[in-house]
């Protein structure tokens, strides 16, 4: 099974559990193939959820990767280090701090602030230092990452 087919199978299994594949990374560490599956859902992604999904994915990988050598599988939530990719992810982060890079008339604009609202078209950040609110459309957002409030 090639990586693209494997991704499709993984996305289907994850979707059946009410979640989404945010990223699927395949890389090598020496002789070991490493599969990293990052999942998110509208509700919290718990360690129990990741463990159950890992067991299910492991059986798929064992069939697909049986004669191809050793591998390691990691299933986790995206965490703060991975950018938000889909508009639905913003809903559960209202009230948290984001760093946003977006296209603007002058090239790119970057801002860090508290996510105060979102709708089908974009988000609004409260920028404390400047006492202002900035609106970003989803089409303009190049990257948005969670930031610690300090």
Image: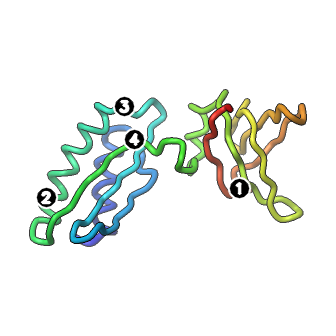
Position in image of residue 107 (x %, y %): 83, 65
Residue in the image at 28% along x and 48% along y: 13
Quadrant of the image for the N terminus? Answer: bottom left
- Kindly identify which residue carries mark 1: 139
Residue in the image at 61% along x and 41% along y: 146
Q: Nearer the viewer, mark 1 or mark 2?
A: 2
- Kindly identify which residue carries mark 3: 46
- Asked which quadrant contains residue 135, the reply is top right
Q: Are marks 2 and 4 in contact (CB under 8 Å)?
A: no
- Kindly identify which residue carries mark 4: 19
Quadrant of the image for the C terminus? Answer: top right
- Kindly identify which residue carries mark 2: 62
Give the mark nearer the N terminus: 2 vs 4. 4
Position in image of residue 142 (x %, y %): 68, 58
Give the mark nearer the N terminus: 1 vs 2. 2
Residue in the image at 53% along x and 50% along y: 82
Q: Nearer the viewer, mark 3 or mark 4?
A: 3
Give the mark nearer the N terminus: 1 vs 4. 4
């Amino acid at each position: 099974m090639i990586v693209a087919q494997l991704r499709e199978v993984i996305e289907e299994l994850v979707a059946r559990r009410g979640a989404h594949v945010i990223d699927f990374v395949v890389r090598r560490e020496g002789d070991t193939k490493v599969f990293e599956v990052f999942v998110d859902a509208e509700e919290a992604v718990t360690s129990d959820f990741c463990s159950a999904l890992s067991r299910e994915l492991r059986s798929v990988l064992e069939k697909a990767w049986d004669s191809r050598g050793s591998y390691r599988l990691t299933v986790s939530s995206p965490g703060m280090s991975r950018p938000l990719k889909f508009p639905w992810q913003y809903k559960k982060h209202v009230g948290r701090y984001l760093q946003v890079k977006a296209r603007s008339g002058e090239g790119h604009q970057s801002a860090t602030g508290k996510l105060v609202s979102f709708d089908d078209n974009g988000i609004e950040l409260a920028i404390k230092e400047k006492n202002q609110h900035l609106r970003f459309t989803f089409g303009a957002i190049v990257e948005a990452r969670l930031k610690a409030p300090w």
